[in-house]
Image (tube, helix red, strand yellow):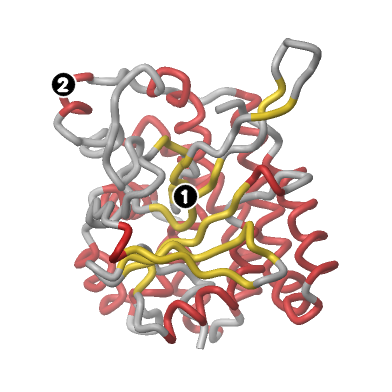
Amino acid sequence: MKSVSALKAVESTLMTINGRTPAYVELTERFGPVFISSARLRDELVAEGVASLEIDPVRLAAGVPVLVGSDFSQWTDLLSSSVKRLLPELLEVLELEDDACEALRVFFDDSDTLLALVQARTEGDWKHFENTSVQLETVSATTLLYISEIVFSPVLCAIAETLGERLESHSWEHGHCPVCGSSPSISQLSPKEITDLDQLVGGGGKKYLHCSLCGHDWRYKRNACPSCGNDDSESREVFYADDTRFERVEACHKCGTYCLNVDLRECEPLPHLDAIQMGLIHLDIYAQKKKLTPLVSTLWNSLD
């Protein structure tokens, strides 16, 4: 899918959320600057170009994401730079205790630590985050994971951008990301398409899952659950608010999970799929009251 400016998308999405739902203004004003800084860095990295990887079709066909098992040392400088840009602002926004902030500054200043964290995150090694949080003493594993995802995301998004077009020629029918292996935090129905025939607008509506870590979007069966693959209409359900039917929850009662979904055919301008989740917390609350679990935990669907 064609790359667009993440910064412009974030800014317009924050404006849309604030204009439509005043109850979310406090949240967007607090966390919006982090999204803006992250998007700005992502755009810079994409414009400058980052080292890419060859796609192994055999591994991919076996369901192994491109970055799993990769040597991240070639991106050490970029990861360190991202930490320096984003960590101070993130620590201020999270309002952590002084001792926790100092421990995290020291911790993230070590390049070996960064490489170990990003390796653990892409391989789903949650035990690494638990063990590390015990060593830090003042930071929970959940907080460490969230901070790691934020500071790594611009670099991983830029790497994913280098793989996007090449991945389109490969078949991938899994519910986890073909780039980094993460679960989707939201899905989309693709926007309307302009044809060359008298500039007619139509079509769209293809389903794509959106990676919660590297931001890659990949095609997926429209009527299937990303978690368990269930496509039985009797055990799948869609929830939405009457005034915003294009934003909804897709629930699977077979495995008890849900995923947010936005129909981009009804959106102008197109939203930033990570930032828009701040404006969909009411859908998360509704789904969780139904005893459903999100495909992946985010700061927004974990708020008390």
Between disc 2 and disc 1, the foreground one is 2
Q: In the image, is residue 92 above or below residue 116?
A: below
Residue under the point 64% across and 45% down: 264
| 278 is higher (above) or lower (below) than 185 | below
19 on left or right of 242: right
Q: Examine the rendered structure and indicate whether residue 283 appears above or below residue 200.
A: below
Q: Residue 230 lies in what quarter of the image?
A: bottom left
Q: Which residue in the protein does label 2 denote?
A: 58
- Report which residue position mark 1 lands on: 152
Which corner quadrant of the image does residue 98 belong to?
bottom right
Name the secondary structure under disc 1.
helix
Quadrant for the N terminus, please: top right
**Where residue 32 sits in the image (x, y, percent)?**
71, 64
Q: Residue at x 77, y 43 (%)?
A: 8
Q: Nearer the viewer, residue 203 or 292?
A: 203
**Going 48% across and 37% down the picture, which residue do you hit?**
77
x 32%, y 68%: residue: 257
Q: Amino acid at mark 1?
A: Phe
Asked if the residue under mark 1 is in contact with the one under mark 2, i.e. CB atoms within 8 Å, the reply is no
Classify 10 Å Cα crowding around label 2: few (below 14), some (14-19), many (20 and above): few
Task: Say which of 191 and 142 sits in front.
Answer: 191
